[in-house]
Image (cartoon, rainbow, N blue to C red):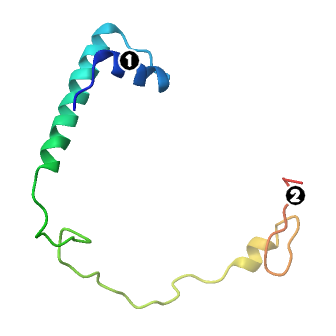
Amino acid sequence: MSLSEEQVGQIAYLARLSLSDEQLKSNTKELNNILDLVEQLTEIDTDDIEPMAHPLHMTQRLREDKVTEQDQSESFQAIAPKIGKRHYLVPTVIE
């Protein structure tokens, strides 16, 4: 599949891009190169290939889940204009 300069111009118009004639020719060539690469990828036989979740077969090292900071919510809420039951009260924005 390849795109013509008119098609790339229409795409640029829809994307609200202003392209000079030189940019239009350059972008048309680059987009057609990308589409050629995608076409080459579609020709690869991947029937016997198992899908991977990640390219490296590694496991994530886990750490112990423990609290590393002190609870400072009371000191933070002490300076707040309005608070509820351990939460901040803010003015209604949408009615």
Q: Quadrant of the N terminus?
A: top left
Q: Residue at x 17, y 49 (%)?
A: 42
Q: Quadrant of the C terminus?
A: bottom right
From the viewer's perspective, tell me whether residue 79 is left or right of residue 60. right
Identify the image quadrant of residue 61.
bottom left
- Which element carries disc 2, helix, strand or loop? loop
39, above or below 20, in the image:
below
Circle 2 residues within 10 Å: few <14, some 14–19, many ≥20: few
Q: Report the number of discs.
A: 2
Q: Residue at x 88, y 68 (%)?
A: 82
**Which residue is at the front of the view, 1 or 20?**
1
Q: Can you identify the residue that label 2 sits on?
A: 92
Circle 1 residues within 10 Å: few <14, some 14–19, many ≥20: many
Q: Residue furthest top?
A: 21
Q: Residue at x 68, y 79 (%)?
A: 72
Q: Residue at x 76, y 79 (%)?
A: 74
18, above or below 52, in the image:
above
What is the number of the mark on residue 9?
1
4, above or below 68, in the image:
above
Of badges 2 and 1, the one in the foreground is: 1
Residue 21 in percent (x, y) is at: 32, 8
Residue 26 in percent (x, y) is at: 24, 18
Kind of residue indicated by mark 2: Thr
Kind of residue indicated by mark 1: Gly
